[in-house]
Amino acid sequence: MILNPETDLELVRHLKAPPAKIWRCWTEPALLEQWFAPRPVVTRDVEIDLRPGGSFKTTMDVPDHGTMVGHGCILDVVAERRFVWSDLMQGGFRPNAEGFGFTAFILLEPEGAGTLYRAVAQHRTPDQKKSHEEMGFHDGWGTAAAQLDDLAVTL
């Protein structure tokens, strides 16, 4: 994957859990609810139709901001290696008027007993990237990745 520094954000972490366990945490709704957003945000009502064109839905209860519903479309699935979705579309490749406007790549590579974890958020414009970065992309996605790893090693 070639990153565009004008529009893409990347988070790279070395996780203790192997790809199979990280994959389960990304693709099983009950597990995703436990780590997907930095605490104290609560993620609930997760729906994952794990196929290209399938829905990827989450509801997050954000203290002081209310409820946020995300509905994206899964674009690519390679078990234990790659999970790609976009909030520019809903399930069935239907246009989504309410998304933030990014495509996310979750890339997993075996690394010893653990995983080299890469999360890439591609945005339409540099301003959109800047907005996502200022919202706390690295801190938020980094905290969520640590929560993901903490859960995955227990499976």
Image (cartoon, rainbow, N blue to C red):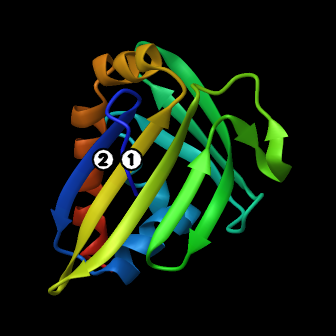
Amino acid type, residue under disc 2 in the picture: Ala
Q: Where does the image place residue 88, in percent across and percent down from the top left?
A: 68, 34
How far apart are the alpha carbons under marks 2 and 1?
14 Å
Q: Residue at x 59, y 51 (%)?
A: 85
Picture quadrant where residue 116 is located: bottom left
Q: Name the residue under label 2.
A: 144
Above or below, comparing residue 116 to residue 133 in the picture: below
Q: Do tag 2 and tag 1 residues touch (Cβ < 8 Å)? A: no
Amino acid type, residue under disc 1 in the picture: Val
Q: Where does the image place residue 143, in percent across and percent down from the top left?
A: 23, 43
Q: Name the residue under label 1.
A: 120
Category of crowding for the residue at label 2, using alpha-carbon neighbours closer than 10 angstroms: few (below 14), some (14–19), many (at least 20)? some
Check disc 1 and report its element: helix, strand or loop: strand
The first of marks 2 and 1 along the sequence is 1
Above or below, comparing residue 60 to residue 2 in the picture: above
How many circles with numbers are drawn on the protein?
2
Picture quadrant where residue 47 is located: bottom right
Numbered tag placed on residue 57 in the rendering: none
